[in-house]
Amino acid sequence: MEEKNEIAQWQKVLKDKVQPGFMTPWQDETKEEEFKAIVRETLCSINFLKGDMGNKRCFLGEGKCSIKNENDIIKVKNEANMPEKSNYIKDVMNEASHYLNGMFNLMHPQVMFNVVPPAAIPSIMGNLMGAMLNPNLVEQEYSGNVAALEIEVSSMISKLIGYDPIKSAGHFTFGGTGAYLFATKLALTKCLQKESRFKGIREDAQILVSKVGHYAVKNCSDWTGLGMKNVRAININEDNSMDINHLEQVMEQCYQEGKQIAMIVVTMGTTDAFGVDNIKEIQQACNRFMMKHDLKRRPFIYADAVIGWAWSMFNSYDFSSNPMEFSKDTLEAIKECKEKIKYLNLADAVGIDFHKTGFTSYNCSMICIKDAEDLKILTRDKDEMAYLYQFSAYTPGEYTLECSRGGSYALAAWCNLKYFGLEGYRAILGNLIEAEKALRKVIGKEPSMVCANERDHGFVTLFRIYPKKLSDASISEDFAKEQYMKEFEDESHAEELRKYNDYQFKVAQELQRMLFEENGPALSFTSKFRLTPYGEPIAAIKAYPMSPYMGCCEKEFKENIIKYILEAAENVDKAYSDRIF
């Protein structure tokens, strides 16, 4: 019986449509050129969506959103269909670019809505390398020398923050919450002993964190099974740092109730106001607590430094000669933050987000553990993972939550660290603080506006704006500052605080409309960046510059930012003229 020379249909589809969708396993100049062409066309599609240099439009393409309500979500679900036939890559990428319409252009200096940076090119290329070759950091064998690269990044960060790189360890994870969750699990296991991994949590161990600490503490206490009710909030000072006196009171209360303190979370740069806790004073409070009650175990100290870690770049900076030539205000702000950040080495573990102040793409986070010996309490038996760890010297999958961990995290971070170095990161951070100082000066000159976090020294500026008619009843030219201080300090003005919280939201809504319809700035809103001394939430509009193209000119801020804010407030005043604002 003669064999047919014709190839089967599946072989034809494989050759003509499937294989062109993959990189070749050997050198092939033609295929490489095809790949480059796809990359070029994709870049062209993205570039086409940007405005020109003179255009203030800070979003991509058209300002439209396909999901405005629940019905839109249902519509997307109903219209979702997988094609029967394979498509051409060019057509797929062209269609994908349409979904970028209305997305913020993070490189644009008028995008200041949160601590979301544009990704630097080296990290993009690192991500691309990881995407093409797909290393898995579950162990060395699955990731090749990318495993060594992860160790190298961990060691660079350890040296930067003051850990001993030989004794410490670190690994990348799925975001700041991933680092927080790992620290929570480690702290609970050290507190409740290894047996708790088998029998479960049967004791109300406590987690202490400031009132402006990240809500991830609720996620982690929930998902570990500890329970959110076992989180205790510590009061804050005027600069949004943890109140040490209240911390000691709460620690004593825990002891009197017979409840162990598993972990104290030290927040090194809050999202909304860049509050930085004094980790040195917190450690000293822990030591006094241990001595007083003759305790053998100190509460695990976790530094949630996902934003603030980058200020470690200034640990070795010569502030006296100021070689980067920062302005006096910026230099003093950096130095004040650095004086707190430099004690990160006192924490038992530190959480770091490269996708925040490291300028990589999402997601790219790391947790560094001061003493690698701590990890032994979380290590799983190799017999449970029979198909792994046969030939590897590096086996983080034995103790990480994830089995699969992509190497793109490590590659992206390594590329940025190597490219920017201390000098580059200092320039980026310094520029953004120079911008923050300039913006606050402009806000300070507007009678209807007040900066609500002037004691903080991060990038972010939180401000409130008040109706101009309030000036009629004020004896001060700075009527906004006068009104805000009344609301903040005096409980008898709580109703006014709530009323003007609502006003901030309405102005923020109007700014959102102006963003897409009038090429306004991309600012955001927070409903509770902190509480008043009498317990009421304070809302504010937020300007969070992150672009390396951000300027520091007060005139430009007045023209490109303040003008829109004042106009938005005026529009709200007109729209709600029947209400007492």
Image: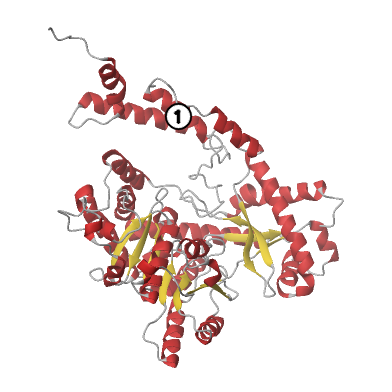
Q: Nearer the viewer, residue 139 or 535?
A: 139
Q: Nearer the viewer, residue 531 or 180?
A: 180
Kindly indicate the quadrant of the structure image that contains residue 526.
Answer: bottom right
Q: Position of residue 544 (x, y in %)?
A: 55, 55
Q: Amino acid at mark 1?
A: Ser
Instruction: Locate the C terminus by quadrant.
Output: bottom right
Residue 546 falls left or right of residue 40: right
Residue 11 falls left or right of residue 390: right
Residue beneath label 1, please? 45
Question: Eyeballing the image, is 292 above or below 364?
Answer: below
Observer able to see residue 65:
no
Observer able to see residue 525:
yes
Q: Position of residue 453 (x, y in %)?
A: 60, 66
Question: Eyeballing the image, is 479 above or below 93?
Answer: below
Q: How many callouts does the rendering have?
A: 1
Q: Nearer the viewer, residue 480 or 357?
A: 357
Q: Position of residue 423 (x, y in %)?
A: 35, 59
Q: Residue at x 39, y 50 (%)?
A: 360
Q: Residue at x 31, y 29 (%)?
A: 36
Q: Residue at x 47, y 76 (%)?
A: 278
Q: Residue at x 64, y 65 (%)?
A: 452
Residue 481 falls left or right of residue 51: right
Kindly indicate the quadrant of the structure image that contains residue 418.
Answer: bottom left
Question: Eyeballing the image, is 177 above or below 212?
Answer: above
Applied colour scheme: secondary structure
Instruction: Locate the N terminus by quadrant.
Output: top left
Residue lying at the far top in this picture: please name it. Answer: 2
Residue lying at the far left in this picture: please name it. Answer: 1
Q: Residues within 10 Å of mark 1 (few under 14, many from 20)?
A: some
Element type where label 1 sits in the image: helix
Q: Position of residue 421 (x, y in %)?
A: 32, 57
